[in-house]
Image (cartoon, grey):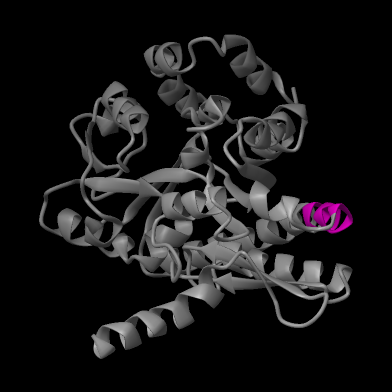
Amino acid sequence: MKKILVALCLVCAIAIPVFASGSSEKSGTVTLTLSEVHAEGYPTTLADYEFARLVEEATEGRIKIEVFSGGTLYGEETGSIEALQIGDIAFARVSASPVASYVPALNIIQLPYLYRDGEHMWQVLNGPIGQDMLAQIQESGSGLVGLAYYDAGSRNFYTKTPVKSVEDMKGLKIRLQNNAMMVEMVQLLGGNGVTGIGPNDVYSAIQQGVIDGAENNWPTYESMGDYQVAPYFVLDGHTRVPEVLLASEEVLNSLDPADVEIIKECAKQTQAYEIEQWALREQSSQEKVVSEGVTVTELTPEQISEFQALMGPLYEKYGAGYEDLIQEIINTGL
């Protein structure tokens, strides 16, 4: 019994300071927790630290933000979201994908071949459409507050054989995240979407011939070493899914309203910083893999149109009820 009590005390001693959304280090000082699944040095993690720096500086030390990176608090982003909802943590950086469970319109900005390029996406996200979706996160009653969008680049196909046209996609087995819309996208392109393969197993799956390739952004392609077994990278930019910096509504409600406004403003200020860090990381990843023999294929607008033209059934299915919004996004910046 003594051993059990000692163990319980040790657990409590460790858990309370880590998971508490706010704790008083000294009179008038609050420390808040931010959960990040990416590793130290990753663009979003760097932005998390910049956010913490700006908030502490702007509040003159009244609010400190402690960043827990590498999934040390929650290995999955859904876990971070659940913790935010009950006020166990104050902030989390997550993909927009799981947030779409609360704001269905966020599914629309993830449709394949929706954007002309990265600039087009940011015109949408930082304009009325994107900012309205950000506001809808809090209005959804989810207990979450959307603070800012971060960049996650574009996802592109990489394969064992060159892909220069839709014709080259036929019959290829492509590893995908467990996402029905992405599976249907590859099927419409003539390939076969394969799910159930974890990111750490993509390399061996390609090497062993289980799959012919996968899709992801430059940093992941490089850091996971997949370029060594799938040396053909085609810049089709099929999806651009942004990251979102979220806050716990419960935690924000416990703070001085003036400090909440400071937090929101600091979060928005970090967007440009994160985009810059992302661009630098993309460039370094691309330079590394090219130097080691990767062939990069940049499609022409006409070739991209071939891919995009096949997405009609998918847009009809997943964009039902949002046709006007989709058209508004397509027309943004024209």
Is 223 left or right of 94, judged from the image as shown?
A: left
264 left or right of 250 in image: right
Image point (30%, 42%), residue name: 176
Quadrant of residue 258 within the rendered picture? bottom right
Relative placement, left or right, of 209 versus 222 is left
Tell me the chief SS of the magenta region.
helix
Compared to 8, does 72 lie above or below? above
Q: Quadrant of residue 283?
A: bottom right
Asked whether the viewer can see residue 180, the reply is: yes
Residue 283 seen from this side: no
Image x and y of residue 293, in percent: 35, 64
Tell me: residue 131, above or below residue 297: above
Residue drawn 71% across the image and 34% down it: 135
Residue at the far front in the pictured view: 1
Read off the magenta span.
Answer: 257-265
Name the quarter where the C terminus is drawn: top right
Horizontal and vertical percent position of residue 65: 68, 70
Q: Nearer the viewer, residue 164 or 81?
A: 81
Q: Is residue 13 magenta?
A: no
The percent position of residue 249, horizontal first and vertical second, equals 66, 47
* Foreground pick, 277 / 320: 320
Which of these two is toward me, 252 or 13? Answer: 13
Q: Is residue 95 above or below residue 200?
A: above
